[in-house]
Image (cartoon, rainbow, N blue to C red):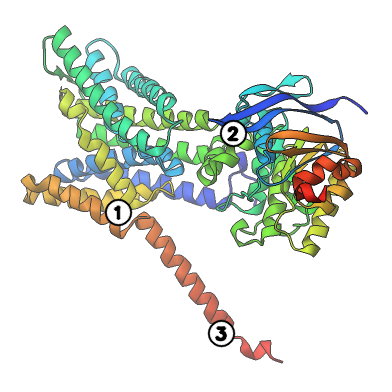
Amino acid sequence: MSELPFGITQKELRIGIGIAVAAAVAALLPLFDQGYYLSLSVNLMLYAALCTAWTLFSGPTHYVSLASAAFFGLGTYAVALGIESIPFPILVIFGALAAAILAGLVGAATLRLSGVYFVIFTLGLAELVRQVVTWAQAKYTGKTGLYVFTDFREMHIFWMLLALTVVIFITGWAINRSRLGFAMQIIGNDETVAKHVGIDTARSKILLFMISGAFIGIAGAICAPRYAYIQPPSAFNPNISFLVVIMSLLGGTKRLWGPLVGVVPFIFVMDFVSAKLPNQMPIVMGIAFLAIVYFVPNGITGLLEQARAKWQARTAAHATADKPAEAHP
Amino acid sequence: MSAYALSVRNVRKQFGGLVAVNNVSFDVFDGELFGLIGPNGSGKTTMMNLISGALKPTAGEIKLGHERISGLSAHHIARKGVSRTFQLVRVLPSLDAEENVMAGAVFGHQRLWGEEARKLAHQLLERVGLGGRAHMPVSAMTYIDQKRVELARSLASNPRVLLLDEWLAGLNPSELQIGIELIAELRAEGRTIIMVEHVMDAIRTLCDRCVVMSSGVKIAEGGVAETLSDPEVVRAYLGDDDA
């Protein structure tokens, strides 16, 4: 077999083809249904993108960010503010930049501190940004919300989110192969060693947080046309931050595809619960959070890996148990 | 002898009211194996941490060649060419031996990447006696093998000054012999090494010169034999009666 470009291995090529096929199949979905299932799939794809982007940063660093709503809202507002005069794709880029800059500032201020401060800071930040936007909007426009009218329909948003998810996966894969990815692996193992082999640990973490934030901002920008009427409480909804954390942890954050394994079942369960018990949603969310932390602390992918290790150990034990005759000649 | 590889000038480190290192000065020549010794709590490891940038001196100056490195952060100092091992061995448990060593090659003084870094890692693993075990998980290794991985990682950056913080501690007698030979080989290659050590045999066989610290101050400096027989040094180790 001839050499592949960029030093891509056969296994990576197979996975890449698998993802391309899966994405192509998913892209056909709007041709079959444009109602309930499409709407459910948009949610699914949105959280697939958000959780994978969140895991890019929080997976290797173990810092739990609750700032997703702030990045998402900035993306949404970038579109809402400019949709009258500026083309949509450029607004998406603005949204990404705004989110990346905010992530950079937060990172520079907090990533030198330990994890707990980071969690609290990001939670407070999301709330602060929401309040500032609410205040600025009331003071300068005299309105409580902004209209976003576009020609996009649900299926277009689905396709954009699908494309975004694929791009996040490719980015994650590229990072894992880069110096930055290797640096993050070392930082995750032992930050003292990382510093002493010459890694600027703060810079690496900030860079990764900015990449992750930018993708969440893009997701927010893409979703703006879906909401049509944008208000701070919906764009900066703190539930987004919490749901992203719950689903990512449910799936597992050690692998790039881990969050996806959490998103799919969670979205279905959430849809069922919100249809049957709309008033009990927060309770269900809380219970889900507790259950995940207690019963699947390493996520579903963690359970799968444990099971695989056990299975391998058992087959290895069988293999040696079958051979005593050879061992004693 | 040639130029100074590292010079420490009037360095002081204070933790609140405790002065861990008090106005210590010494120079290390290029290609020299320099010992830093003293009883427990004398400030040797603090001195190492000041050189590697894990701690910043309260006062004084540390120079690498002609460049001032005191006050820089650890990763800057590492890139300028100081690498170290740790008193309690620190390997990267989720990575294999090869990746552990590559960490030093990729981010340190010489910044290699890809095949080049991998090749160097293999050479160094061979060099420290771990040839053929490149893909063994380091968590499954014995203590001395982990120490070997750590040494290979420090060498991978091709440092101008190598700091060994009690690298020989905790080894059994036969391992100790292997360890001493390994360090002697590095010295023969012309590496500049500063070692903190409790194993006096190793200091006697290996070091060109040494500094003795006690309670944060330098009490002696010079050739190993005369320094170790200095009455002040004997008193620091054994107490007044034996001096």
Residue B68 position by quadrant: top right
Chain-order first, disc 1 or disc 3: 1
* Residue found at x 46% / y 36%: A171
Q: Are marks 2 and 3 in contact (CB under 8 Å)?
A: no
**Residue A88 position (above or below residue B116):** above
Label 3: few (<14), some (14–19) or many (≥20) C-alpha neighbours in 10 Å: few
- The secondary structure type at the circle numbered 1 is helix
From this viewpoint, is residue A312 visible? yes
Tags 2 and 3 both on a single chain: yes
Give the amino acid at mark 3. Ala
Q: Which residue is mark 2?
A: A199
Using the image as rendered, state which of residue B151 and residue A51 is in the foreground: B151
Residue pictured at 65% horizontal, 43% vertical: B41
> Which quarter of the rendering shows the C terminus of chain A?
bottom right
What residue is drawn where x is 24% and y is 36%?
A240
Residue B213 image offset from top left, x and y in percent = 74, 38
Q: Above or below — where is A267 with respect to B162? A: below
Which image quadrant is residue B171 in? bottom right
Q: CA distance from mark 1 to mark 3?
A: 38 Å
Closer to the observer: label 2 or label 3? 2
The earlier-in-sequence mark between 2 and 3 is 2
Residue type (three-letter) at the residue carrying disc 1 = Val
Which residue in the rendered view is the most extreme toward the front?
Answer: B241
Hey, which quadrant is residue A133 in on the image?
Answer: top left
Residue identifier under label 3: A321
Q: Is residue B11 above or below residue B210?
A: above
The x and y percentages for residue B38 are 74, 43
Say which of A21 and B176 sits in front: B176
Along the horizontal axis of the image, is B56 left or right of B145? Answer: left
> SS for tag 2?
loop
| Residue placed most toward the observer, A167 or B6 | B6
